[in-house]
Image: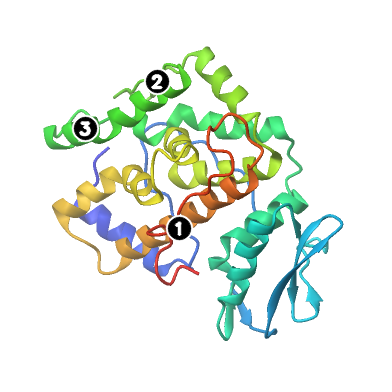
């Protein structure tokens, strides 16, 4: 469970030598489910080739126009999204690019491409089960046994979120210090699978994306229900890392970059979920979109 100062320094060095967008997930106790190839790996950069970005409504939804060219997916399908709000958000990603298009900052565009092309050919049931499987290794369900200060921090910060989720969905989740993690009751899985089934395929792509970023189904549920802000969810997912930073100090700019990148991805995924789930019946927030103030890190694209 514990990382020494040397291991922190080594992790920072690995981070500094990785290409942007290729951040390594922090070590977690117990088995970690392998993240499926749910989204395209976008090209790194290219010179901006358009002046104006606009949206138009077509027969299949809303389209993005780069000058007089219609945006296409990697499989050459017409880039069409189901709502005007999502189209505006994607168009903003493209319009905000400067002389160089930095595709690795365009998370909404990548999520739309994945939803349109479905490169892994997964159906709704497979997406739902991939997300729910993260309960087995949920970040906030694994606890340390020492030192006492970190034990208390995890209890104070994580227990209220688990208690909220248990009450909100009338399920049992719990936590454990065992390397095998908590024993999640079958009913809990069934309830959450049923809840996620109320979301459409587009929203489910966003849900799985956020779960993968935070390594937590519980924190993702908090974001979906607007119980947590992105900043809160990200800090809760990095509780041990932040504790170690307070103890050992920061590694130059590496930790700050990792934090900002995780916030950007989580914010984009959460916004995508809400923009794609207007017809969702179980969230209790139909048509209510999360505020972006304080969500989008400066320079995140």
**What x and y, as percent, mark residue 74?**
76, 63
Name the residue rendered at 43%, 54% in the picture: 24
Task: Please indicate, yes or no, whether residue 277 appears anywhere in the rendered image.
Answer: yes
Whole-number angstrom distance, CA of label 2 to CA of label 3: 17 Å
**What x and y, as percent, mark residue 181?**
38, 24
Q: State the residue in front, 114 or 146.
A: 114
Q: Nearer the viewer, mark 1 or mark 3?
A: 1
Name the residue rendered at 37%, 48% in the picture: 234
Is 162 situated left or right of 195 in this image? left
State which tag comes first along the sequence, 2 or 3. 3
**What x and y, as percent, mark residue 184?**
45, 18
Name the residue rendered at 48%, 67% in the picture: 20
In the displayed structure, would residue 136 be above or below residue 74? above
Residue indicated by mark 2 = 167
In the figure, residue 65 lies in which quadrant? bottom right
In the figure, residue 124 lies in which quadrant? top right
> Dot 1, crowdedness within 10 Å: few (<14), some or many (≥20)?
few
> Dot 2, crowdedness within 10 Å: few (<14), some or many (≥20)?
few
Task: Please indicate, yes or no, whether residue 43 appears anywhere in the rendered image.
Answer: no
Residue indicated by mark 3 = 156
Q: How is the image coloured?
A: rainbow
State which tag comes first along the sequence, 1 or 3. 3
Is 252 situated left or right of 201 in this image? left
* SS under mark 1: loop
In the displayed structure, would residue 65 be above or below residue 293? below
Q: Nearer the viewer, mark 2 or mark 3?
A: 2
Whole-number angstrom distance, CA of label 1 to CA of label 3: 27 Å
Instruction: Tell me the number on the disc at residue 292.
Output: 1
């Amino acid at each position: 469970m514990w990382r020494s100062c040397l291991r922190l320094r080594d992790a920072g060095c690995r981070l500094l030598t990785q290409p942007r967008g290729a951040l390594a997930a922090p070590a977690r106790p117990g088995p970690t489910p392998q993240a499926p190839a749910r989204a395209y790996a976008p090209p790194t950069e290219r010179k901006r080739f358009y002046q104006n970005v606009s949206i138009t409504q077509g027969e299949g939804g809303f389209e993005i126009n780069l000058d007089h060219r219609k945006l296409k997916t990697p499989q050459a399908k017409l880039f069409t999204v189901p709502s005007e709000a999502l189209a505006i958000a994607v168009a903003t990603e493209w319009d905000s690019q400067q002389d160089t298009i930095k595709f690795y900052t365009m998370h909404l565009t990548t999520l739309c491409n994945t939803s349109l092309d479905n490169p892994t050919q997964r159906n709704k049931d497979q997406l739902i089960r991939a997300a729910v499987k993260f309960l087995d290794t949920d970040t906030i369900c694994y606890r340390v046994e020492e030192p006492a200060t970190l034990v208390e921090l995890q209890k104070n910060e994580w227990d209220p979120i688990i208690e909220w989720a248990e009450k909100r969905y009338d399920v049992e989740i719990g936590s454990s210090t065992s390397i095998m993690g908590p024993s999640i009751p079958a009913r809990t899985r069934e309830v959450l699978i049923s809840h996620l089934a109320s979301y459409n395929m587009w929203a489910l792509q966003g849900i799985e994306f956020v779960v993968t970023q935070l390594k937590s189904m519980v924190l993702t549920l908090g974001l979906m229900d607007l119980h947590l802000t992105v900043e809160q969810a990200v800090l809760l997912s990095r509780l041990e890392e932040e504790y170690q930073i307070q103890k050992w100090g920061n590694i130059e700019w590496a930790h700050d970059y990792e934090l900002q990148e995780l916030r950007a991805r989580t914010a984009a995924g959460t916004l995508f979920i809400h923009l794609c789930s207007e017809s969702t019946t179980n969230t209790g927030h139909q048509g209510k979109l999360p505020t972006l103030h304080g969500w989008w890190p400066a320079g995140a694209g």
